[in-house]
Amino acid sequence: MEKKKKQLVVARSSAEAEYCVMTSVVCELFWLKTFFEDLGFPHVTPMQLFCDNQVAKHIASNSVFHERTKHIVDCHYIRQQVQAKFIQPRHVCSHDQLVDVLTKVLTSTQFHRLLSKLRSTNPLDPA
């Protein structure tokens, strides 16, 4: 059995990096949709794909191919899924990104606000 080699992708911008992640997420969503349909649970409404990068969201939603995006191989796949109404890109403000609790330096107020969204009040609580 042949092992698949992971493809190394070097992003030229944060929008491109975000776009590559969006592609991976859409592939997983497509697999999950197919899996649930096989189990008898069809999903007909577009799945919302949240993204905090406005440029990546606009690349996905805009059907016009721009010269600056010609090197992004995944453009066509995401756009096809948006046009097919499989996904609907939505913007989430970076102020509301829960992952920032784990990845960024935050003010005490912002830290506790995001921590409360995770239903936790103690940062040392293992649960």
Image (cartoon, rainbow, N blue to C red):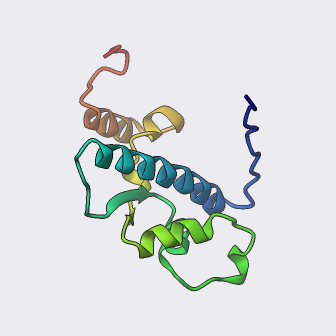
Q: Quadrant of residue 45?
A: bottom left
Q: Is residue 74 left or right of residue 51?
A: right
Nearer to the camera, 19 or 81: 81
Q: How many numbered discs?
A: 0
Q: Quadrant of the N terminus?
A: top right
Q: Is residue 22 left or right of residue 69?
A: left
Nearer to the camera, 123 or 34: 34
Q: Residue at x 52, y 72 (%)?
A: 79
Q: Quadrant of residue 6?
A: top right
Q: Up-down: is 88 above or below 123?
A: below
Q: Residue at x 61, y 69 (%)?
A: 75
Q: Position of residue 67 (x, y in %)?
A: 72, 82
Nearer to the camera, 89 or 43: 43
Q: Position of residue 121 (x, y in %)?
A: 26, 25
Q: Quadrant of residue 8?
A: top right
Nearer to the camera, 62 or 36: 36
Q: Quadrant of the C terminus?
A: top left
Q: Up-down: is 104 above or below 123?
A: below
Residue that protrudes farthest toward the bottom in the picture = 64
Q: Position of residue 19 (x, y in %)?
A: 58, 60
Q: Is residue 121 left or right of residue 59?
A: left
Q: Up-down: is 63 above or below 93?
A: below
Q: Residue at x 75, y 45 (%)?
A: 7
Q: Position of residue 63 (x, y in %)?
A: 52, 82
